[in-house]
Image (tube, rainbow, N blue to C red):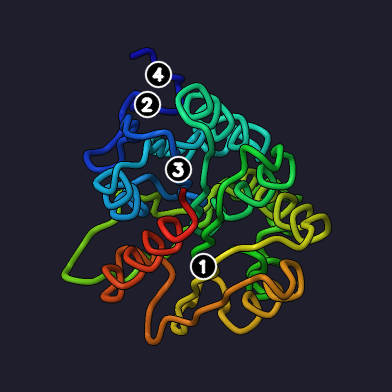
Amino acid sequence: MILPQSLRPPHGCPPGAEPMAIEGGREGVLVLHGFTGSPWEVAPVAQALAQQGFTVAMPVLAGHATTVHALNETTWDDWLKSAEDALAWLDARCDRVHHVGLSMGTLLTLLIARRRPSGRLGHIALLAPALVLPEWQRVAMGTLARLGWPEVLGKADPLLANGQKSPCYAAVPLRAGASFLALMDLVVAQTPPMRALVLHGSADVTIPCARATAIARRLLGSEAIVHIVPKAGHLLPRTDAGPQVVQEVVDWLQRYTS
């Protein structure tokens, strides 16, 4: 099985952050992680879908799962290319492809979905959609990126269930961060109404829940199904509510498969 680059572990990939490509049935799922993160964040979703017989592709987006400095040399076009390469692998094996994204992965999901032929586009699940940032964070990231110094800005590790440790970057690369903001603005400006499941943790301090879900409802329209997950943080599949989140995504996709 020849895999595209985004479905092969990059050099220096930390344990647990590897991509996934599992062949199953003719229904496929593209599963995308977030900015500065890795496939580890969404692996519980991908694994559960594979167990249900879906063909699953969970790529490493360009610059991730290596070094924060490598990420700083990439832009959202590179991340989109990584996702599209994995999607092409799925398209060669599946009649239809569903989409699951977490955080920045939701932005790429929405960008891809609006370009897909309707017959090949399956159903969409958006976890903690990165449709807005706290205003101070957005201003700080944009200002420092324009100044060109520092190159990276430290960040706190996410609080996760059962002492889990995420193999994500402990810093935000600011040039790449500016590209992330540009992607966010593009998606918010150009996303048409579409049917999607939106899950967001009420305790998410990375992407404000109330503001993000309000934007999701406005963009996606009346067919959006929005569920607030009580007391859950940003990395939904890895929180205490993770099993509930994973099951809701699996049920959502299975409900609409033929």
Give the mark nearer the N terminus: 1 vs 2: 2
Taking the spot 55% from the left edge, 69% from the top edge, the residue there is 198
Point out the frontmost of discs 2 and 3: 3
Picture layout, residue 137 above or below residue 81: below
Q: Position of residue 108 (x, y in %)?
A: 62, 47
Task: Spot the residue most to the top.
Answer: 2
Q: Gap in Å between the C-alphas at discs 4 and 1?
A: 29 Å
Taking the spot 41% from the left edge, 36% from the top edge, the residue there is 57
Instruction: List the residue tagged with mark 2.
Output: 10
Inspect the image, locate mark 3, and give the three-letter code of the amino acid beneath it: Val
Q: Quadrant of residue 15?
A: top left
Instruction: List the residue tagged with mark 4.
Output: 3
Q: Gap in Å between the C-alphas at discs 1 and 3?
A: 18 Å
Inspect the image, locate mark 4, and give the three-letter code of the amino acid beneath it: Leu
Q: Quadrant of residue 38?
A: top left
Give the mark nearer the N terminus: 4 vs 1: 4
| Disc ID at residue 29 | 3
Point out the frontmost of discs 1 and 2: 1
Element on which disc 4 rests: loop
Q: Gap in Å between the C-alphas at discs 1 and 2?
A: 26 Å
C-beta proximity under 8 Å, tags 4 and 3: no
Q: Quadrant of residue 96?
A: top right
Give the mark nearer the N terminus: 2 vs 3: 2
C-beta proximity under 8 Å, tags 2 and 3: no
